[in-house]
Image: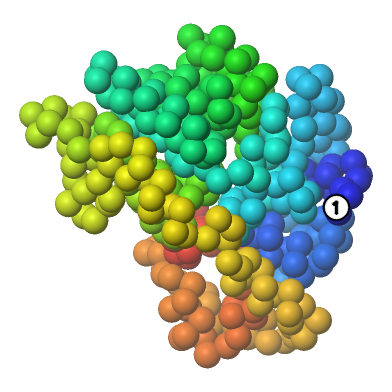
Amino acid sequence: MTSVSDAERLAWLRLYRSERIGPVTFRQLLNRYETADRALDAIPELARLAGGKRSPRLADLRSIEREWRAIEAAGATLLIAKDPRFSDWLKAAADGPPLLTVKGQIALLQKPSVALVGARNASANGRRFTEQIAGQLGTRDYVVVSGLARGIDTAAHRGSLASGTVAVLAGGLDIIYPPENAELYEEIALTGLIVAEMAMGSQPTARLFPNRNRIISGLSLGVVVVEAARRSGSLITARLAAEQGREVFAVPGSPLDPRAEGSNHLTREGAHLVTQASDVTDLLEGLPQRPIAEPEIESDLLDTRLTLSQDDIDQVRKRLWTLLGAEPVAIDELVRQCDASVNTVHAALVELELAGLILRYPNHGIARHYD
């Protein structure tokens, strides 16, 4: 088993908490410079090369040490992707977080998981069905993942407490939301696992929930939507699951109930229909229980780390700047139009992002950042 020192985990935490460092940029920096400390040292020069007005603010070491102490005081663990206990499925997601704060039974991250999500204002039948199917999934040795929200999420956790459940929070690990789930939170911390990407003390603001949703889907082999309005966070989770190559399932509902509109829409779009747990498990048992390969971005950069030429990166960066505008462009298209290696394009994009000149969008879209 690979050992991970506290010093290395602190360096990862500092790099990830620094300004303009998202999951993709973090991964590319680490692959290019091998350690978080070297990546931190390189950031000011990379931003300067791209013509940034100012270098990204690196996370203050004192604030990182305070977060570290808060994690320890909570009886939690800072888990980095290099740790063998980290979820293989989440590590394989291109936009997956490089680190998590976790509390509880960490071994659950290595078991096959299914996400159950749905409406906060769920119907009584929706809650009962969710609790029932969560329990059935548990007896089939699947861990149930959800977001600790009201309604369907709460029912999913309650139904799987005995077998193991993972609650993914939008804010910090120490911020229980909604407050009425405080008792459930404590039960999960004992027999299941609490997971958070954000720093301790972070409030769960609206912009953080899509980030949480990508972790829910990223941890899971498949996502089951029980009840959801046509415009809801649950449908965002389903979309993210599809983009991550996960299976999407939906429980049909009455066409007269607006809470079923979203799940019914998913079935029309090709989601697997679910009326019982076997509808999920029969399909998943025929699929790989471990990701087949690491993300393409990571393997490419690891193979060619020492061959990147700064002159080539400079030329590609200038070409990228002419290609980019206000509308996001897929990275594959940028690679094609630059007529350069994918590694050189990614390296140039990292410099532009650190300079604050571009924005990354879901599904690998890149656009100029207009202040």
Q: Is residue 186 above or below residue 329?
A: above
Q: Is residue 109 left or right of residue 267?
A: right
| Colour scheme in use | rainbow
What percent of the width, then of the height, locates residue 313?
67, 81
Q: Nearer the viewer, residue 140 or 144?
A: 140
Question: To which residue does mark 1 refer?
Answer: 1
Q: Is residue 283 left or right of residue 65?
A: left
Residue pushed farthest bottom? 339
Residue appearing at x 47%, y 19% in the figure:
158
Secondary element at tag 1: loop
Residue appearing at x 69%, y 57% in the figure:
26
Residue appearing at x 81%, y 35% in the figure:
64
What percent of the width, then of the height, locates residue 197?
63, 38
Q: How many other residues sit within 10 Å of disc 1, few (<14), some (14-19) or many (≥20)?
A: few
The amino acid type found where label 1 is placed reads Met
Residue appearing at x 68%, y 60% in the figure:
27
Q: Nearer the viewer, residue 282 or 52?
A: 282
Q: Is residue 133 visible?
A: yes
What percent of the width, then of the height, locates residue 198?
63, 35
Residue pushed farthest left? 256
Q: Is residue 193 left or right of residue 38?
A: left
